[in-house]
Image: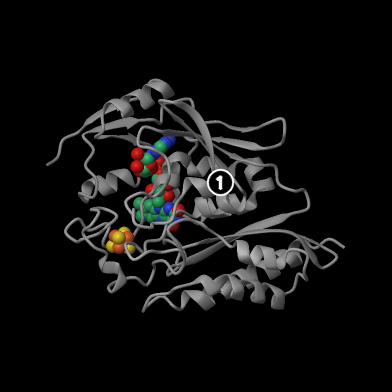
C-alpha cells in the first residue's frame, strides 16, 4: 500500500507554494479521476493538496458580458446554471453528456480540464506507454486503438483527450486563467492543450506548480446558436467515440459565423479551422457542410481500426450544422 499526505489549501497562493515546494505533490479536486489513477498505480503523489475549499465556486457575468467560471465549480452546478443554459447550451449539453450525476456532483471545472486519457495502455501500469513512462513505447499504435486519435497524433502517442466540457470550451474560444509562483497568466484553450509530438507525457502547457483558478468565456453573438452532440457506444456513462461542439450564425441562408470543435479524435479538442474557413460566407446547407468537413478530414491519419471515425465525424458535423441551421435561421 502506498501512503500519502492529505491537506486542504487555505488560499490560492498557499496551494501554489505547496506545489512548488514538493515535486511529488498533486492538487485534488473532486478526485474522480486522480484517485482512480492512484488506485491503478498510474500516478503516485506523496501529497494531495485539496483545492475544493478555495473560494473558486462562483460563476459571474462580467461587465463586458463574458462569463467567469471558478475552477471549483462542480460540473453539475455549471451545467444547470441559468446563464450557461441560456447563452451557452453547447457547454451545458457537453457537461451533461459526461460521466454520471453522482460523478458530476463531485467533479470540478478545474479537474475536468486535467483528466487524463482513457487509452487502455495508459491506465494499465503493467504495460508500456510513452505517456505514462516516456520512452517505453506506444502499444496502442498496433494494438487497441479503436477509440484513439485520427488527427494530430505522433509516432509516440495516438491518445485522445476524454473531456466533453473541453470540446465545448474550444468551440466557445474560452480562456484558462492559471496562477503560479510567477503570478497569473491567461491562455486560450487552444494554447492550454497540446498535441503529443515527441513529449506525449505532457497533456497541456501549464507547469506543475500552476493551478487553474478560472475559465473565461467571451459573450456569444446574440444571433448565434450552439449545441453539442456525442457519439458513444452506450447511451449514457460512456466517453465519446467522437463528438462535436458547434456554434453557428446563419443569416439569409449564408454562414455569418461558425465555430466547430471535435472530441474523441485528437490529443486535444480539435478545432476544425479548415472547415470553418470553407464555410464562412458560403451557403448554409448540408452539401456545403459535408464539403467543408471532407476538406477538414483530409488531414486525418487513421489507424487500422479507427478509419470509421472519418465518415462518422463528417456525418456528425454535417447533421449537427443542419439541425442548428433549422433551429436558428434568421431571415
Ligand atoms: C466512470 C466515469 C465516467 C466518466 N465519463 C466521462 C465522460 O463521459 N466525459 C467526460 O468528459 N468525463 C468523464 N469522466 C471524467 C470526469 O469528468 C472527470 O473525472 C472529472 O471531471 C475530473 O474532475 P475532478 O474535480 O474530480 O478532478 P480530480 O480527479 O480531482 O483531478 C484531476 C486532475 O486535475 C488536477 N486538478 C484538479 N483541480 C485543479 C486545478 N484547479 N488546477 C490545476 N489542476 C487541477 C489534479 O491534480 C488531477 O491531476 C468520467 C469519469 C468516470 C470515473
Ligand atoms: S496512445 Fe499514448 S497513452 Fe496510449 S499507449 Fe500510446 S503513448 Fe500511451
Query: Percent x, y for residue 265?
Result: 46, 65
The response on whether ligand 1 sits within 8 Å of label 1 is: no
Q: What is the number of callouts on the image? A: 1
Residue 68 image position (x, y, % from top left): 60, 35
Ligand 2 picture quarter: bottom left
Please give the name of the residue rendered at 34% of the width and 57% of the height, measured from the top-left corner: 198
Q: Which quadrant of the structure image shows residue 119? A: bottom left
Residue at (54%, 74%) from the top-left corner?
Answer: 298
Q: Is residue 291 above or below residue 53?
A: below
Depicted 259 relative to depicted 304: above or below: above
Residue 142 visible somewhere in the drawing? yes
Q: Which residue is mark 1?
A: 79
Residue at screen point 28% across, 48% down? 36
Residue 11 lies in quadrant: top left
Asked whether 192 or 240 is in front, the reply is 192
Where is the N terminus found, in terms of image quarters? top left
Query: Residue lying farthest left?
Result: 1
Determine whether 276 is above or below 219 in the image.
below
**Residue 108 percent across, percent down from the top left:** 44, 40
Q: What residue is drawn where x is 60% and y is 76%?
A: 294
Q: Quadrant of the C terminus?
A: bottom right
- Secondary structure under tag 1 reads helix
Which colouring convention does the figure follow?
Answer: one colour
Q: Is residue 296 left or right of residue 66?
A: left
Amino acid at each position: 500500500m502506498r501512503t500519502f499526505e492529505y491537506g486542504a489549501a487555505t488560499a490560492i497562493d498557499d496551494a501554489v507554494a505547496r506545489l512548488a515546494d514538493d515535486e511529488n505533490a498533486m492538487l485534488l479536486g473532486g478526485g474522480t479521476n486522480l484517485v482512480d489513477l492512484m488506485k491503478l498505480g498510474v500516478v503516485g503523489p506523496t501529497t494531495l493538496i485539496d483545492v475544493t475549499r478555495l473560494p473558486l465556486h462562483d460563476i459571474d457575468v462580467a461587465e463586458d458580458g463574458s462569463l467567469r467560471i471558478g475552477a471549483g465549480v462542480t460540473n453539475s452546478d455549471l451545467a444547470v446554471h441559468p446563464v450557461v443554459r441560456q447563452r451557452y447550451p453547447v457547454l451545458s449539453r457537453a457537461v451533461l453528456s459526461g460521466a454520471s450525476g453522482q460523478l458530476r456532483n463531485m467533479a470540478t471545472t478545474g479537474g475536468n480540464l486535467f483528466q487524463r486519457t482513457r487509452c487502455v495502455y495508459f491506465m494499465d501500469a503493467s504495460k508500456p506507454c510513452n505517456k505514462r513512462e516516456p520512452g517505453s513505447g506506444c502499444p496502442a499504435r498496433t494494438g487497441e486503438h479503436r477509440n484513439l486519435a485520427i488527427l494530430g497524433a505522433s509516432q509516440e502517442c495516438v491518445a485522445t483527450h476524454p473531456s466533453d466540457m473541453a470540446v465545448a470550451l474550444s468551440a466557445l474560444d474560452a480562456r484558462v486563467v492559471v496562477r503560479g509562483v510567477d503570478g497569473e497568466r491567461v491562455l486560450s484553450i487552444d494554447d492550454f492543450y497540446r498535441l503529443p509530438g515527441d513529449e506525449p507525457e505532457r497533456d497541456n502547457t501549464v507547469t506543475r506548480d500552476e493551478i487553474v483558478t478560472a475559465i473565461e468565456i467571451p459573450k456569444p453573438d446574440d444571433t448565434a446558436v450552439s449545441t453539442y452532440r456525442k457519439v458513444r457506444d452506450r447511451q449514457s456513462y460512456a466517453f465519446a467515440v467522437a463528438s462535436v461542439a458547434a456554434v453557428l450564425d446563419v443569416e439569409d441562408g449564408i454562414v455569418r459565423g461558425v465555430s466547430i470543435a471535435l472530441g474523441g479524435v485528437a490529443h486535444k479538442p480539435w478545432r476544425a479551422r479548415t472547415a470553418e474557413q470553407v464555410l464562412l460566407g458560403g451557403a448554409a446547407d448540408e452539401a456545403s457542410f459535408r464539403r467543408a468537413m471532407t476538406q477538414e478530414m483530409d488531414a486525418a491519419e487513421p489507424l487500422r481500426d479507427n478509419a470509421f471515425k472519418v465518415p462518422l465525424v463528417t456525418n456528425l458535423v454535417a447533421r449537427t450544422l443542419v439541425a442548428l441551421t433549422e433551429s436558428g435561421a434568421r431571415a
